[in-house]
Image (cartoon, rainbow, N blue to C red):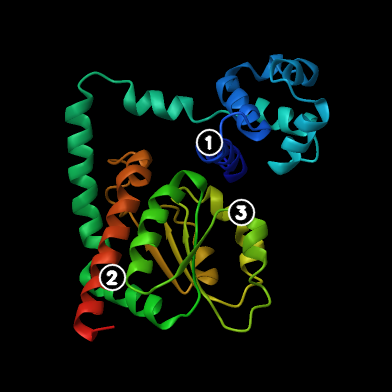
Amino acid sequence: MDNNRLNLLYKLNHIANELEMGTVEYELAKFFLENFKCVNKWNIYQIAEDNNVSRASVRRFAKQLGYANFSDMKAHVQEFDDGINDFQQFYGVEGFLDVLVSNIQALMKELSIQMNTQEVDRLNKLINENKEVIIFTSSNIAGLVKTFQQRMIIFGKRITLLTELDDLKKFKNVKEKPLIIVFSISGLLLSTILSELREINATKILFTNNRNPIYNQDFDKLYHLSSQHHESDINDLLYYNYGINFVLDLLFNGYLMKYKKEGI
């Protein structure tokens, strides 16, 4: 899935989770989530009638989600593949417990090599030294980063979490050079923001499994979460579910220890 598709689900779920029941936005978000698999049957007249809202409200909601109009939103959702094949291939197997445990063990062993103490210290030094620290990632990882973000603020370090390209563009003309950390496991997310990212004067760090050599020109430091030797052994879904958390926990531990030592 591309980042825009992930962001659509993220926005719909956020509205359904955060807004009060009975509001127009809540009811429409709930409708679209419940009928995501029936997109071919979407009809603005029927949607308005079923949810007791006007057609203008449906159009405004589509614009709120980032689309020019309802037709564009419908067309976009019709292209949605929502990762069904990937999920079925990994999760839809017999003996899943043994497969999962084996994969997690291999992943932790691999990451403990990639993210050794020296690398964690180097990253935390950058995080400490930069006033503006930005983590850019897709919406499916944003929840993990939010937990890290909240923990860090407790110890006095504010971190900005971004999932939208338009929000990233706002840092093109800032006075102080920020630190931008990008999480893009497959490289798909990165491909959607790279041209804009190049125009931002910042220290740039990338976490990925994509080995495109061009990234060496655009980032001050690359962290490949998998080694070439083990790339085919660990499913990419594990990096999203467990790998990112592993990295963030190591960073938080390193920052916390630095905090204790320095008495910040």
Q: Earlier in the sequence, mark 2 or mark 3?
A: 2
Asked whether disc 3 touches disc 1, contact meaning CB atoms under 8 Å apart, the reply is no
Q: Write down the residue under mark 2.
A: 120
Q: Is residue 44 above or below residue 9?
A: above
Check the picture and name the quadrant holding the C terminus: bottom left
Q: Is residue 162 visible?
A: yes
Q: Nearer the viewer, residue 4 or 57?
A: 57
Asked whether disc 2 touches disc 3, contact meaning CB atoms under 8 Å apart, the reply is no
Describe residue 235's horizontal placement relative to residue 198 as left or right. Answer: left
Spatial separation of the CA atoms under disc 2 and disc 3: 27 Å
Q: Position of residue 62 (x, y in %)?
A: 73, 36
Q: Tell me the SS state at disc 3.
A: loop
**Label 3 environment density (alpha carbons within 10 Å; few <14, some 14–19, many ≥20):** some
Describe residue 68's horizontal placement relative to residue 243 as left or right. Answer: right
Q: Is residue 79 visible?
A: no
Residue 236, quarter of the rendered image: top left
Q: Write down the residue under mark 1.
A: 13
Q: Residue at x 45, y 53 (%)?
A: 210
Inspect the image, locate mark 1, and give the three-letter code of the amino acid beneath it: Asn
Spatial separation of the CA atoms under disc 3 and disc 1: 16 Å
Inspect the image, locate mark 3, and give the three-letter code of the amino acid beneath it: Glu
**Label 2 environment density (alpha carbons within 10 Å; few <14, some 14–19, many ≥20):** some
Q: Write down the residue under mark 3.
A: 164
Q: Residue at x 62, y 57 (%)?
A: 193
Inspect the image, locate mark 2, and give the three-letter code of the amino acid beneath it: Val
Q: Tell me the SS state at disc 1.
A: helix
Q: Nearer the viewer, mark 2 or mark 1?
A: 1
Q: Residue at x 25, y 71 (%)?
A: 256
Q: Nearer the viewer, mark 3 or mark 1?
A: 1
